[in-house]
Image (cartoon, rainbow, N blue to C red):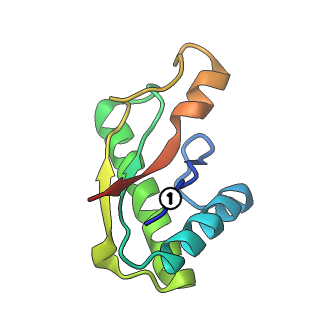
Amino acid sequence: MKEVELDTIYFDVNKTNISPTAAKALDKNGALLRDNPKVRVEIGGHSDASGSDAANMKASEKRAESAKKYLQDKFNIAADRMTVKGYGATKPIADNKTKEGQAKNRRVEFRVIK
């Protein structure tokens, strides 16, 4: 199997819905999953550090679920090929003290699972 590179998608503050920009990335991911039927992924939702831990965890889970639902609805990807996990603010990739950093932390990442 060739290397599969899946795009990360980003969310606005307090949002869990799929934006037009996120939809473009998800369309690419959906096509890759459709064309590689043996690939399974973890859809990991993340948040920035503003808000309570509980609220951040809930938002991260909803973001991951939104991405999974989009791929199921548009590309008919089987649910058992996608695992959803919410990480809240526990795995930042950028500084939560800046608006730019917070924007990078509000994301859903796709990780291929063996």
For the residue labelled by badge 1, is the local secondary structure a helix, a strand or a loop?
loop
User: Is residue 31 positioned above or below 14 on the image?
Assistant: below
User: Is residue 95 positioned above or below 109 on the image?
Assistant: above
Asked whether 77 or 90 is in front, the reply is 77
Q: Amino acid at mark 1?
A: Val
Place of residue 111 in the rendered image (x, y in percent of width and height, measured from the top left) = 39, 51
Left or right of residue 99, residue 47 in this image:
left
Q: Looking at the figure, which quarter contains the C terminus?
A: bottom left
- Residue extending furthest toward the top: 97
- Residue extending furthest toward the bottom: 76
Residue drawn at 57 percent across, 60 percent down: 17
User: Is residue 107 positioned above or below 62 on the image?
Assistant: above
- Residue extending furthest toward the front: 1
Asked whether 7 or 63 is in front, the reply is 7
Place of residue 57 in the rendered image (x, y in percent of width and height, measured from the top left) = 32, 42
Residue drawn at 51 percent across, 79 percent down: 34
Q: How many marks?
A: 1
Judge the density around disc 1: few (<14), some (14-19), many (≥20) Cα neighbours within 10 Å.
few
Asked whether 28 or 53 is in front, the reply is 28
Place of residue 30 in the rendered image (x, y in percent of width and height, measured from the top left) = 55, 72
Q: Looking at the figure, which quarter contains the N terminus?
A: bottom left
Residue drawn at 38 percent across, 69 percent down: 39
Q: Quadrant of residue 27?
A: bottom right
Q: Quadrant of residue 42?
A: bottom left
Residue drawn at 42 percent across, 29 percent down: 51
Q: Which residue is mark 1?
A: 4
